[in-house]
Image (tube, rainbow, N blue to C red):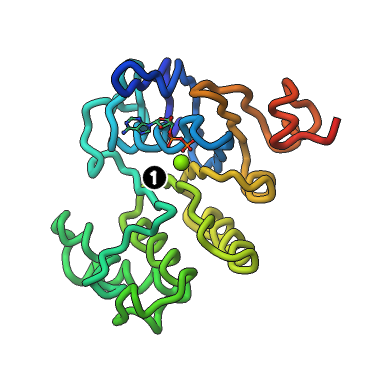
Amino acid sequence: MTALSLTNVCKSFGPVEVLKDINLDVEDGEFVVFVGPSGCGKSTLLRVIAGLEDATSGEINIAGEQVNTTPPAKRGIAMVFQSYALYPHLTVRGNMALALKQAKVAKDEIEARVQEASRMLDLGAYLDRRPSELSGGQRQRVAIGRAIVRQPKLFLFDEPLSNLDAALRMNTRIEIANLHRQLSASMIYVTHDQTEAMTLADKIVVLRDGRVEQIGSPMELYNDPANQFVAGFLGAPS
Ligand code: ADP
Ligand code: MG
């Protein structure tokens, strides 16, 4: 089954074309990494997939269903932002539970999902704290937990580790790889970190100026980059 299928997706802001004819399939359970220079359209593409922006043209299919006009909350997707985007006035538990409360999930079920996610993310001791009482790494884990409790089929991560220091980045990267194994969900992950891309990805999508430059496994891109641009990102020195 194909988790996500993009066909000729374009996005303009006024006269500015930011995404140009994007075609991409993400299979069930696949870990797909988007890389490319700042401003090439990575975040916009995630936002279009999530429904936070409308595509100007083209088709977005999720689990076989056309979702172009489906609101974000109904797409079966959860997004994790670089900025965490936690609610400062809510506790860790409150942050994780909020979307489920809004979706009218039963109280017991909410608590069970929050417990399960906090166990996975080692946040059990912090459930009653507010974001300001947590470290950066803990805050990012809460943001990931908030995505997990929604049990999405597809996770979108927008440079989730770029605000963390190097040691924490490595730990959290390993944690995300473990989560991917445990949850058997599809994940799309934006990064500009070559190590993250090479170690996490089943498939890497190299974006340049709003277009797909090359798609392949880490080894394909490393050993056989289509051009200097791809080589510069991921390939062997040439
Ligand atoms: P990336 O995440 O790869 O750094 P973005 O998707 O954030 O790139 O941005 C791609 C381009 O789209 C940039 O030139 C940016 O200025 C432009 N852009 C993004 N969002 C908007 C918006 N809401 N209105 C106008 N231009 C935007
Ligand atoms: Mg971005």
Q: Where's ligand 1: which quadrant?
A: top left
Residue linked to disc 1: 153
For the C terminus, which image quadrant? top right
Q: Is residue 237 visible?
A: yes
- Residue 109 at what x, y percent from top left? 24, 67
Q: Residue at x 40, y 56 (%)?
A: 83
In this rendering, would 153 be left or right of 193? left
Compare residues 38 and 48 and report the one nearer the observer: 38
Choose top left, top right, bottom left or bottom right for residue 97: bottom left
Q: Residue at x 61, y 36 (%)?
A: 203
Q: Residue at x 75, y 36 (%)?
A: 219
In this rendering, would 5 be left or right of 51? right
- Residue 197 at what x, y percent from top left? 64, 44
Mark 1 neighbour class, 10 Å CA radius: few under 14, some 14 to 19, many 20 or more:
many
Q: Residue at x 56, y 28 (%)?
A: 207
- Residue 63 at what x, y percent from top left? 37, 33
- Residue 233 at what x, y percent from top left? 69, 35
